[in-house]
Structure formats: structure tokens, C-alpha cells
Image (tube, helix red, strand yellow):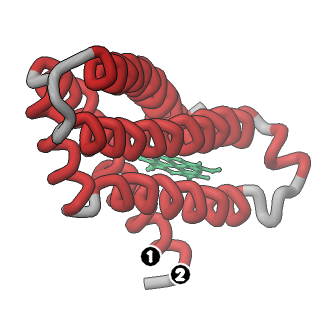
Amino acid sequence: MTTFLIVRVLHILLAAVWIGAVFAATFFFLPAIQEAKAAGGQVMHGVQKRGMLMFIPSMAGLVTLSGLYLYYHFTSGFDPVISGSMAGRVFGIGGIAGILAAIIGSGVGRKARKVVALMQQAGPMPDGPGKATLMQQAAALQQSMATSSKITLVLMAIALICMSVGHYV
Ligand code: HEM
């Protein structure tokens, strides 16, 4: 197998894992964690301990790097004529959507770490206004994570559609 084929296989495999992980987190884990309130914070801590907050950005980074290599290969070194062709533009738009998804997705990871920290701080506190404020901040961050995750998924879907049709337009 050539380097190109190995990178292509890795690109598609990692993109599939990345999208699947974000889809499951957005539509299954996050809503369940939000519903569970304080117990949800413990679940998020468990998920963080198992490395999910490192795993997803690593997938995003590897898909972006391999995608840039594939784009370089497809356009024979960013040749402006090939980049400006219909296929070049479609892969370009998909690539930009994929890179934006990676950037917004990394913001979700940062918010998740803050939620875990806030909930760990609130956990041992007695019930009262101090604890309620921390829990409210955590809930607001979780809501913002849910919105950003959905935006990330839309961008990923745009990337996936562009990549799937790029060779045939
Ligand atoms: C969510 C992010 C991404 C997903 C889901 C994704 C998915 C895919 C898939 C499924 C293919 C195979 C298409 C086919 O067989 O016809 C592909 C190919 C490709 N991807 Fe991506 N990709 C993503 C991000 C990127 C990025 C960020 C770039 C570049 C900046 C990129 C550049 C390319 C190129 C140039 C090809 C075609 C390679 C070739 O056959 O010449 N991708 N991608």
C-alpha cells in the first residue's frame, strides 16, 4: 500500500470514529448527564478519567492532518487550477467545515473540564446559595456544550457530504 492509501484509510476510519463519538455524546450521553444533575457530574468525571476528553480532540486533530495531506495530494501540491476546479472547491469547502468542527469541538472539551471542576467543588459543599450558584454555572455550561456539539455535528455532516461527492462533481 502506498502512503496515500494508508493515509486515506486512516482518514476515513478516524473520521467515522470521530463522528460516531460526537453523535453518541450529543444525543445520548449529554442529555442523560444533564438530567442527572449532581450525579451527572460524577459520570462526567468518570468519562474524563477514561480519557474521552483527550480521545475526541485526538481524532479531530488526526482527521484534520490526514485531510490536509489528502488535499495536498489531490491538488498536486495546492495547484491553483486543481484547487479551483469543482472537485477542488467541494473538497475545500468540506475541509473548512471539518476544520471548523475540530475547533468548535475542542471548545466543548474545555467546557466539559470546567463542568467537572465546578461539580467537584460543589459536591462536598452543604446545600445553600454557594452550592446553588456553582450548580447553575455548571448547568449553563452543559447547555452551551449541547448547543456547540450540535453545531459541530452539522459541520461534520457538511464535511462528510462534500467528501463523499467530491470525486464525482
Ligand atoms: C469531519 C471531517 C471529515 C470527514 C467526515 C471526512 C470524510 C472523508 C471521506 C469519507 C472521504 C472519502 C471520500 C471518497 O471516497 O470519495 C474523504 C476524502 C478526502 N478528504 Fe476528508 N473528511 C473530513 C475532514 C477533512 C479535512 C479537514 C480535509 C482537508 C483539509 C479533508 C480532505 C479530504 C480529501 C482531499 C479527500 C479525497 C482524497 C482522495 O481520494 O484524493 N477531509 N474524507
Residue 167 in view in this figure: no
State the image coordinates of residue 161 (x, y, percent, origin top left).
46, 30
What secondary structure is marked by label 1?
helix
Q: Which residue is mark 2?
A: 3
> Viewed as shown, does residue 31 lie left or right of 99?
left
Task: Point out the image quarter for the C terminus.
Answer: top right
C-alpha gap between disc 1 and disc 2:
5 Å
Q: Residues within 10 Å of mark 2 (few under 14, many from 20)?
A: few
Instruction: Name the residue rendered at 66%, 59% in the picture.
Output: 68
Toward the viewer: 142 or 8?
142
Instruction: Name the residue rendered at 26%, 54% in the picture.
Output: 48
Compared to residue 130, the image places residue 52 above or below, namely below
Residue 37 in view in this figure: yes
Toward the viewer: 127 or 23?
127
Residue 6 image label: 1
Residue 96 image label: none
Instruction: Name the residue rendered at 20%, 62% in the picture.
Output: 50
Compared to residue 109, the image places residue 33 above or below, namely above
Q: Are marks 1 and 2 in contact (CB under 8 Å)?
A: yes
State the image coordinates of residue 139 (x, y, percent, origin top left).
31, 20
Q: Residue furthest right?
A: 80
State the image coordinates of residue 20 (x, y, percent, origin top left).
25, 42
What's the amino acid at mark 2?
Thr
What's the amino acid at mark 1?
Ile
What secondary structure is marked by label 2?
helix
> Viewed as shown, does residue 81 lie left or right of 144?
right
Q: Residues within 10 Å of mark 1 (few under 14, many from 20)?
A: few
Toward the viewer: 33 or 1?
33
Instruction: Name the residue rendered at 33%, 41% in the picture.
Output: 19
Compared to residue 39, the image places residue 55 above or below, namely below
Task: Point out the image quarter for the N terminus.
Answer: bottom left
